[in-house]
Amino acid sequence: MPSRNARGWVHGCAIVLLLAAIALPGCTRGNSVSTAENIRQGTEGIVLSFLSTYSKDIIVGGDQKEDLFFTLKAENRGAYPSQDDGNAEGLIWLSGYDPAVITFESPSPDASVSLGELQLRGKTPYSQVGDSSIIDFKGTINVDKLNFPDGKYAPTILGNLCYRYKTVAQPQVCIEKDPLSFTVKKACTAGDVSLSSQGAPIAVTKVEQLSTATKAQFKLTFRNVGRGIVVNPDKSCTKDAMASIQRYDLDWVRIERMSIAGKRLACGGTGSSNAVRLVDGTGYVTCSIALPDIYQGTAPAFATPLDIEVSYLYKDTIQQSIRIAKIT
């Protein structure tokens, strides 16, 4: 018969194993919540890359036409658009080549494809990876046009991407009935909030609270944290529109929503278009709301999300060098 100590040891192990089994589902649920919170992290939106599916050195001969292929991958590494927002909006196109030497047949004669034709939604609470798509550009080398002294043509092919995107941030702020009162215990105290990224190339990086006894006021900092350029969202993602961009069309974002508890804040200096200008990649705006519009009850202070949404066009360019040599 097992001793009393042995029986106690077995009983203790059984309890430990039972507690571990109970705790595991809780850990799984915790991970699910973490996943939902983490989709709005990262500094990228839609990203374009060349795939190495062809030789960069191409030898042609005679005057017959030769096929030419470029394969690009488009990945949405950000958090927009969601299922409710529909498909991504924008354009991918190739440039940097002499249209007399290289012509394209697909996906279009002008070597472009609309993002609306691709499935490129962003990350979700159930997937940390957004949609991706492969685009094959089929072209032709017009060998008879290679009338160069050394018979070589070495263009740098540009892969251009323009897309419409949004950044959503919901930092928690503190609303105080009397910011200068220190005689009562408060649930929170107003102060600055620092943020890093929101799963988009434009990020809200800081919220500074400047509240008074009559209004809640916030100074927001926006920053271009991606590798591309920001374009006024009033422009269109077309080849013609991008070719006609002027300096004053760059570095603008538009505030689509700035609210607390569904009540919209007034943002100074944005005009009727609610536009904010970025200088050297950084922009600022100050928004405020009267306390009576959002204050409920008699609590001296309460914490609440500041609901922020900004929209913009984002343009990025990648490149791939090739060399075409004609032998006679």
Image (cartoon, helix red, strand yellow):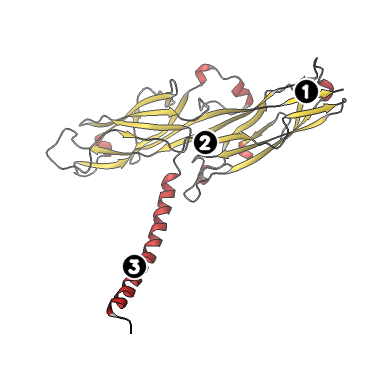
Q: CA distance from mark 2 to mark 1?
A: 34 Å
The one nearer the camera, 190 or 38, is 38
Task: Look at label 1 and name its amino acid.
Answer: Val
Q: Decide: few, some or many residues near mark 1? Use Cα within 10 Å; few <14, some 14-19, many ≥20.
A: some
**Sooner in the amino-acid sequence: mark 2 or mark 1:** 2
Residue matched to label 1: 101
Extreme-bottom residue of the structure: 1
Residue matched to label 3: 16
Q: Residue at x 26, y 29 (%)?
A: 210
Residue 151 relative to residue 188: left or right = right
Q: Position of residue 54 (x, y in %)?
A: 72, 35
Residue matched to label 2: 45
The reply to whether discs 3 and 1 touch (Cβ–Cβ < 8 Å) is no
**Sooner in the amino-acid sequence: mark 3 or mark 1:** 3
The one nearer the camera, 261 or 90, is 90
How many numbered discs, if any?
3
Question: Could you say whether the residue bearing mark 2 is in a helix, strand or loop?
Answer: loop
